[in-house]
Amino acid sequence: MIRFSMIGAASNAGGEMLRMMINHPETELAYVADGFSSGLHITEVHPALQGFYDAVLLSDSEEDVETILNGTDVLFLAVNPGNVFPIAEKALAKGVKVIDFGADIRFRDSNVWEQWYKVKCDYPQMCRDAVYSIPEIWRDQIKGKSLISNPGCYPTASALGLYPFIDNHLIEKDSVIVEAVSGTTGAGRRPDFSKLHMVQDGNFKAYGVAGHRHTPEIEQSIEMIGGEPSKIIFTPHLAPMPRGIHVTIYGNLKRPMTDEEIYELYVKYYKDEPFVFPHKAGDWPNTKWTVATNHCHLAAAYEPRTQRIIICSVIDNIGKGAAGQAIQNMNIIFGLEETTGLKLAPTFP
């Protein structure tokens, strides 16, 4: 059995990972910890897990981290920016594999991370050593690796939608515009006036305009796929729904394509992928198709008047956008079937 632990277990993504792991036959929970909720029973912060786990949250102190690492095979991290490095360094020294939910090791160039997250990086080599993995694109690069960067939710949905077109040099990379919508779970669990039901119910707003931190991550994905740097426009919005990511991507195509060609291209790339579902133009994905799963649904259409492609890509922000993808990555690095523990149907309606 693979012994897994999580620091940052009180987070939305932490709770979702624990829920999904209930179905995983090859793992057992070793420890849960959280810097803000230590001492509480896991079911006090995630009441829906009652009857499945019997654990008390440790802290993220050096002493507790040492305890965790001595009984763990793989450590999942969902901690504040800048806090991953010392924990990961200790874990790797003990032979513990690390999968990070945050942004600390997402950028190969640590200067980009410092610029966007305003935190100094004292471990630039760790950023270069970490493997960034959306499995459908980079699975071969993480097999047998020990330090995995789990991509963000918006970048995951965006990269999966763009992948075939970037890989075939069909789209003008600097023409890409990403408009995205997220459910409120993406904003975390800490109290904030903007998250109150009376504020968000019936409301819709943009945030992080002209400066959201996922912008350089999407640009990095495009460069990793196509081999050339790019500059995009990315604007996220917050919708009055608990979970889900819907991205609409616009870009100039280098040649006209029929909608049937576009669909066939998606099928070519994703026909053997158990978690990605292409649809024909007109069969536009719904966020509810992905709730509580590791699934992604895609569709696209060509707009001949402007010679632009319009792509819609949908995932669950704490599923494929966080916990589900982390488990998929774990399965790969331990040599398990990727779908292990992840054969989950969405909760619909």
Image (cartoon, grey):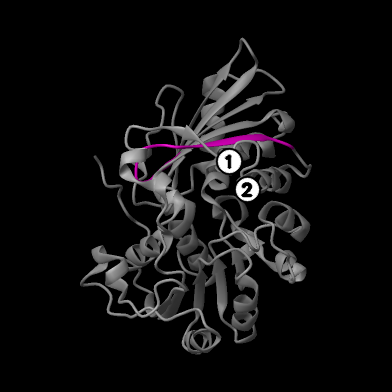
Q: Position of residue 159 (x, y in %)?
A: 59, 43
- In the drawing, what numbered circle is on residue 213? 2
Query: Was residue 143 drawn as part of the magenta stretch in this picture?
Result: no
Query: Was residue 239 drawn as part of the magenta stretch in this picture?
Result: yes
If the image is split into quadrants, where does the N terminus sit? Answer: bottom left
Q: 22 or 7: nearer the eye?
A: 7
The residue beneath circle 1 is: 208
Q: Which region of the structure is painted magenta?
A: 231-245
Asked if residue 46 lies left or right of residue 169, the reply is left
Q: 51 or 260: nearer the eye?
A: 51
Q: Is residue 334 above or below residue 272?
A: below
Question: What residue do we see at 48% from left, 61% from top?
Answer: 328
SS for dot 2: loop
Asked if residue 109 lies left or right of residue 274, the reply is right
Q: Position of residue 140 (x, y in %)?
A: 62, 60
Disc 2 residue type (three-letter): Arg
Neighbour tally class for label 2: few under 14, some 14-19, many 20 plus, Cα within 10 Å = some
